[in-house]
Amino acid sequence: MEISPDAIVFWRWGVVSLNATILFTWIVMALMAAVSWLVTRKLAEGTKLTRWQNLLEVLVTGIEGQIRDVSHQEPRLFLPFVGTLFLFIALSNLLSIVPGYLPPTGSLSTTTSLALSVFIAVPFFGFSKQGGKGYLRHYITPSIFMLPFNIMGELSRTVALAVRLFGNVMSGTMIVAILLSIVPLLFPVVMQLLGLLVGLIQAYIFAVLAMVYVASATQTYHEKELEKNKKGDK
Amino acid sequence: MLIDWFTVFAQIVNFLILIWLLNKFLYGPIIAAMDRREEKIALRLQEAGQKGDEAAKEMALYRQKNEEITKRREEMLSQAREDAERLRKELAGKAREEVGEVRKRWHEAIKQEKDSFLKELKKRAGKQVYAIARRALTDLSDSDLERRITSVFIKQIEGLDKGRRRKLADAIRQSGQTVIISSASQLDMNVKQQITRTVHDHLLTSIDVHYETSPHILCGIELKASGYVLGWNLGEYLKTLEEELSRALEKESAEK
């Protein structure tokens, strides 16, 4: 029994290999892109919507709302990144109900790559919003002595992101697999349902945490002060 | 090792591609559509607001017009009421006048009718009384009555006061010293002589006395001289009776 879908390799040429993780990622990507394309091909701008358009609009506005709640900033800039993180992880996890499907998020390589993306995105958004100086000052607050701790914190939370998602998804898949061999009927279904719930929650947690990191990097000093004052008033 | 670094790299690339794909096919179009819809809704709301304002203006205008119409109607109604009242009064007055006129005419007609009836009645009654009396007197008249009448006539001449006597004498002189004694029937010679003597004694001595019978005199004797008449005539009494009778009838009808 394989722990990671990385181990299932269909084709290999040197370091380049086509494993189950990449394959299923492509399938998820294709599915998402196809559904999006099909639905957004004919968008209604009036008050009458198709069900699919309505669903996608609810999704998009829901994500926007969450981003706004977490970051207290305009969500349009972060929507593609955070939204894609959430949708990709959620769909990858939800599809695990399909027999024969292995969630790409159950591979530590995938979760690492997503965590690395967040790791890169944080300074990227920080630079673009505050400028280099503003962002870098963030590492030496409240004093220069905090610099190593801030860097360690940045690294450790990236690792935590990757391992948390991997552990949850992998454990869900593993538990179902193990239970199937012990109690083949009914109980695995319950666990699978639980797995779906956990998968969705993990997608939410991953996206929200990514947003929190990005938001902390993009919030200017002035904005932070304002927020502190608001909390003080309450 | 659970991490395959090639897969990590490939997944990062996949993830970036997915972001691009979703941005192109999902977020972009959906957000654009939502923005356009919001714009449209805002536009519609604005239009609705404008229309609402216009409607409110129109409503205010119509309300004002309505009020004006109501006011005007009230005015017209009160005017019409006044006109009707005036006309009613006028007509009632006219009707009253007409009724008064008719009543007056009616009263006049009744009065005329009554008058003519009374006149007729009077006439007939008088005539009847007269006729009866005449008939009765004719039946009664004989020499004795004649004598009595003559004696009354003679007493009348004898009893004339000075003034009247002079007037009578003047009248006789004017008529050429002639007096005419009229009676209902032919008088006896004795009676004629007695009368002639009395006239000569009490009035003028040198006058002619003519005797004649007159159907107008019912019962009695008359002395005529140039318009002056003296005598006793039952016709006079009857005339007086007739007059009295008609006066009594008139009084009675007036009391009614």
Image (cartoon, grey):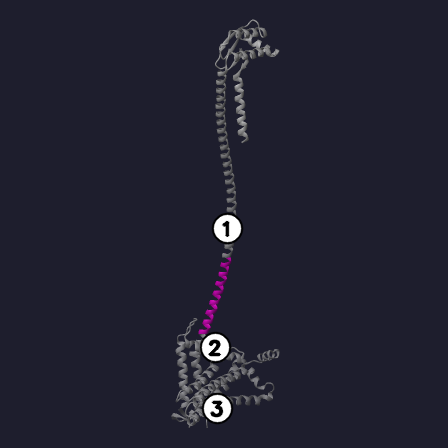
Lower position in the chain sequence, tag 2 or tag 3: 2
Could you tell me which quadrant the N terminus of chain A lies in?
A: bottom left
Q: Which residue is mark 3?
A: A167
Would you say the magenta stretch is mainly helix, strand or loop?
helix
Disc 1, SS: helix
Residue A102: quadrant of the picture = bottom left
Decide if residue A146 is in sight here.
yes
User: Eyeballing the image, is A116 above or below A46?
Assistant: below
Q: CA distance from mark 3 to mark 1?
A: 88 Å
User: Bounds of the magenta span?
Assistant: B33-61
Identify which amino acid the numbered label 2 is placed on: Thr
Closer to viewer: mark 3 or mark 1: 1
Q: Residue furthest left?
A: A11
Q: Residues within 10 Å of mark 1 (few under 14, many from 20)?
A: few
Along the line of sight, which residue is nearer the eye, B73 or B165? B165
Asked if badges 2 and 1 are on one and the same chain, I answer: no
Q: Residue A195 in the image: x percent, y percent?
A: 46, 88
Say which of A162 and B125 sits in front. B125
Q: Label 3 lies in what chain?
A: A
Q: Circle 2 is placed at which residue position?
A: A61
